[in-house]
Image (cartoon, rainbow, N blue to C red):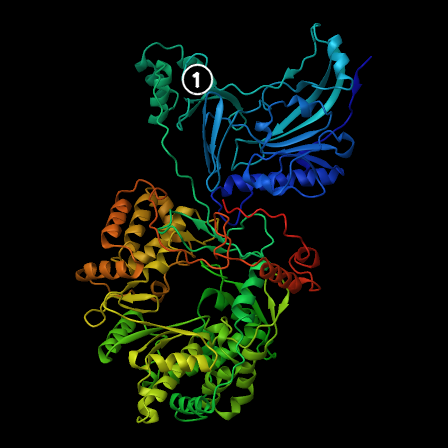
Amino acid sequence: RTRKVYDMEWFVGCSHVEFNPTRSGDNGHAKSGAVRDASRKLVDSSLSANGWSRLEISPGGKVQPNILSDHVHYAPSDLAFPISMDSHRTNDYDVIVCIDVDYYISDMDYYLSKCKPMIMHTFNPQKVSGLDGDAPFRIKGDVVTYDVGGGNTWTHKIWDWCNHGEFVMATDPKPPGWWWKRWLGLERVVYSKVMHSRPWKACPDRALVWTIPTGSHYQFKWLPNDMHARKLQRVKYSDDLRPGWNSLTYFDQDSESLMISLGRCGADASITLKKNDYDILMGLDAAQAVTTRMLSMKYTDPRIQALFGQYHKGTITNILEPSTIGKPASLVHWPYALDCDYPEVSARQYAAPIVDNPSLMPMIKRWEVLSESLERRVTFVANNKLPDNRIMAMAIEFVNCVVPVAHHGDPYTWERTAEELDKPKQIQAVRSVWSSLDEHPRNLIEAFVKNEPTTKAGRIISSFHDVRFLLGFSRFTLRFRDEVLHAEHNSHWFCPGLGPIALADKVCNYAQCVESVVEGDYSNFDGTVSAWLQRHVMNAVYLRWFARDYSDELRYFTNSLINSPARAKSFGFNYEPGFGVKSGSPTTCDLNTVLNAFLMYCAVRKTERDMTIKECFQRIGLAFGDDSLFERRYKSAWVKVAEKVGMSLKVEVCTADTGVCFLARVFPDPLVTTTSFQDPMRTWRKLHLTSRDPKVPINDAALDRVEGYLITDPLSPITSDFCRMVKRLLGHTNPAAEAQRWARKDRGREKPYWIVAGEAWPQAAEDIDLMWNVTSSRVGISVEMLLDYKARLDNSEGVLTVTPLAVPNAVANSVMPDGTPSEPVVDPRNVQDQRDVNHSRVVNQPNRDGVGRDTASRQADGGVRNQG
């Protein structure tokens, strides 16, 4: 008479659409994390389709204000929200949700007795050790130890949701009027139907479990219960016949056979046999007979034979439990005003970093990151300064020197220009507009954050949306470079277009011709270029050389570099691009070099008052974009000239200890040798990262990356040793896999630019000691410590096991991986101001690619910033 029946149906599979989930970035557990993400989406979709509300158990950082939860502080991410226990509000929710947390519930009867459907994403392995996607696990004492790369190590027991038995029974710990019912010996029993599936091939040990309440009744404790229902229990993995071993049977749908998994307690090695074969083999007496029968049963793997032979004998062996280094997550640059709860990585880490303060990856998929970069690289550094009369006169002199004969140049034809743009993406883009070249090009700029390691706000790429603009402007820029900038009278300072060998010779010749060399280091060169500099120096050289017949067309292109509208490429909001250099323009490298040379020319003119204009022009140093080498005697005037035109320049004096650095190449002794090596600190901070497509196996991406460095820097201290270590440990032994790697069209995507160009920088074996000494001076670490680190690389057994070198932190304007700010003091008012600016960029903007008013107005106060 006390029975109740709950009539309901629920099939979760109707909402399953993502069969092979992937993550675009790697946080150390990309596979298992992608499956968990897909499971959460499936649960959300199924609940929404049925119009149900939820109670979520320990949702961590995923909790939302409008969701009821039983939230307890077990992990650091749980601290973002207060403790809550809403499960008693049974009238306010329809389903109980557990995402990867059911193991920690000690009394599952408490939730099953609520007579609510439950759904769980849970770990329920079909083998006694192995990999769950990319997370290793093992079992000892029926307790699973689960290591999460880029995360934590978790230990827990497993509920037997997937065991035989369609119904489970639960006893309500506190039914209504429980105190007097307990005194009478009455208890309320609830029955639930249990269903499960394993829908993800990447993680077959992950199960989606859901329960549906079917009925309940009261009974006396002392009377037997004849219902065919099982009590939910923890899974027992320990083998009763073989102490110190684990065993587990399961049904394999592919082979339609009952299988058994065997392995030592706490060991990572395990084997799987057919249960029928296992029963036969266990009846044999002699070890030789076991091996013979296994070969007859086609178990030819020596590992299976060896481990089963030990199991058959009952050998008990102590298992070594060494310290384990988990798979690393790619750490990200995290601006203070970012409205984000977890890092959205855009790169993968294939080895331990060389230094303990490596570069970080920008979260390029976040609109706030682009907004932050626009503020710091465009708005804050905008340059409206006008120079004095003397610099104005020098600009005229310089333009006349660069272009001695005016108005006689012609641009390339459309066909010749199309031939010059020979990269695959350029070819495809040109083909898409070839039939509409007569249309007027649109001068719209689209910006995005470059996906490269950084220590501060990410660099912005400002590209012109219309391919006709790029193709039309390239007719002028390519012709001007070939005919003017590469002409003999400009060859002493203009370096773009030269190969590594020619550049090395040029650097050495310059160092030998002057008394002392200095390096120029501009702060945010592109962003601090003023409109005056663009019009009177950079663009003026074009307008002077090309014939007047092309002036109107050319002026449209050059004016567009200064006054074009701009928007965010992926997010759609508009922004003010300022007057600075647009990095995606065909003019960027050439005209940056021209401006760099102009500032050096001004420094010479201010210092050498007795020299003629041509003599001063001949004194210009080496320029390549914003990189420059100059004579030390002009150092003071050079800095003052840069300041007068609104730019910031820091000059480093080159010494015998630190060598000469140009184009991120260090020349240890340019007076004697052309040997050079990659700037060590800049390279070491990012060499362990790859931003290749996640579909490319990480070992292949790592090999493609390091092989390029082994061509350009085969002798460079530490850099070459690190690359050889990666190649030794991650190299393929399977010829088919190696052939597949070589067949990929994008395998050269992350190789150094000079490899793609077809040349390598010269390095001489007799200069190795010199390179070690200069490297030591540049990084501030003794040669002995560097040699010790080299020895550790040479002897390393794994790419993640070498302890990084300790170097100073160079990160700015970011939350560090340990949750602390990169600066000693951070003003909360500035953070809030930046957050307001970020939101203002997208409020009232058109909703594009999912970003609009709702996204912009989100509150960021509850985010958990933990890069682990």
The N terminus: image quadrant: top right
Camera-side residue of 347 and 610: 610
* Furthest-right residue in this view: 1
* Furthest-left residue in this view: 766
Is 422 placed left or right of 683 in the picture?
right
* Kind of residue sitting beneath label 1: Asp
Relative to 181, is 609 above or below? below
Camera-side residue of 216 and 269: 216
Question: Residue at coordinates 33% horizontally, 18% vertically from top-left?
Answer: 291
Q: Position of residue 425 (x, y in %)?
A: 49, 65
Is 620 placed left or right of 186 in the picture?
left
Question: Residue at coordinates 33% horizontally, 80% vertically from top-left?
Answer: 493
Relative to 820, is 106 above or below? above
Question: Residue at coordinates 19% horizontally, 59% vertically from top-left?
Answer: 769
Instruction: Indicate the secondary structure of the residue bearing disc 1.
Output: helix
- Judge whether residue 16 can be spotted in this image: no
Relative to 228, is 89 above or below? below
Q: Position of residue 374 (x, y in %)?
A: 56, 66
Camera-side residue of 164 and 291: 164
Q: Residue 668 appears in which quarter of the rendering? A: bottom left
Residue to which mark 1 is pinned: 277
Q: Position of residue 659 (x, y in %)?
A: 26, 67
Q: Position of residue 323 (x, y in %)?
A: 37, 34
Question: Residue at coordinates 58% horizontally, 20% vertically from top-left?
Answer: 163
- Judge whether residue 83 can be spotted in this image: yes
Q: Residue 454 appears in which quarter of the rendering? A: bottom left
